[in-house]
Image: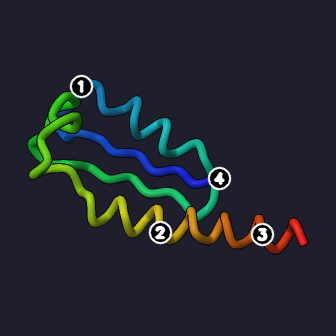
Amino acid sequence: MQFSLFMAKKRIPSYFSKDAYAKPTGDNKELMIIPGAVHTDLYDQMDIILFDQMEDFFRTYLVKTWFLSQIHSI
């Protein structure tokens, strides 16, 4: 399972996001903290959303998951 969590730095309480991030095991997870942002900023403020990092994460783990599922279905 892939797990990517985006957290606004000014979010109160941020402990919920950090606790949620800590639960999944493995190396296929990433916590992205956006400095100076509040929760609702991540809905529509395109200049602060980390699209490049999101793309890298999903390309790495979704492609890997898809490829492995194809091998196992043979």
| Kind of residue at disc 3 | Gln
In the figure, residue 17 lies in which quadrant? top left
For marks 2 and 1 on the same chain, the one whose residue lies earlier in the sequence = 1
For marks 3 and 1 on the same chain, the one whose residue lies earlier in the sequence = 1
Tag shown at residue 12? 1
Tag shown at residue 1? 4
Q: SS class of the residue under badge 1?
A: loop
Q: SS class of the residue under badge 2?
A: helix
Mark 3 vs mark 1: in front: 3
Name the foreground residue: 74 vs 54.
74
- Say if 30 sits above or below 61 in the image: above
- The residue under the point 9% across, 52% down is 47
What residue is shown with label 3? 70
User: Residue 71: x and y, percent?
Assistant: 82, 74
Tag shown at residue 59? 2
Q: Are marks 1 and 4 in contact (CB under 8 Å)?
A: no
As drawn, is 53 to the left or to the right of 70?
left
| Kind of residue at disc 2 | Arg
Spatial CA distance of label 3 from label 1 is: 42 Å
Tag shown at residue 46? none
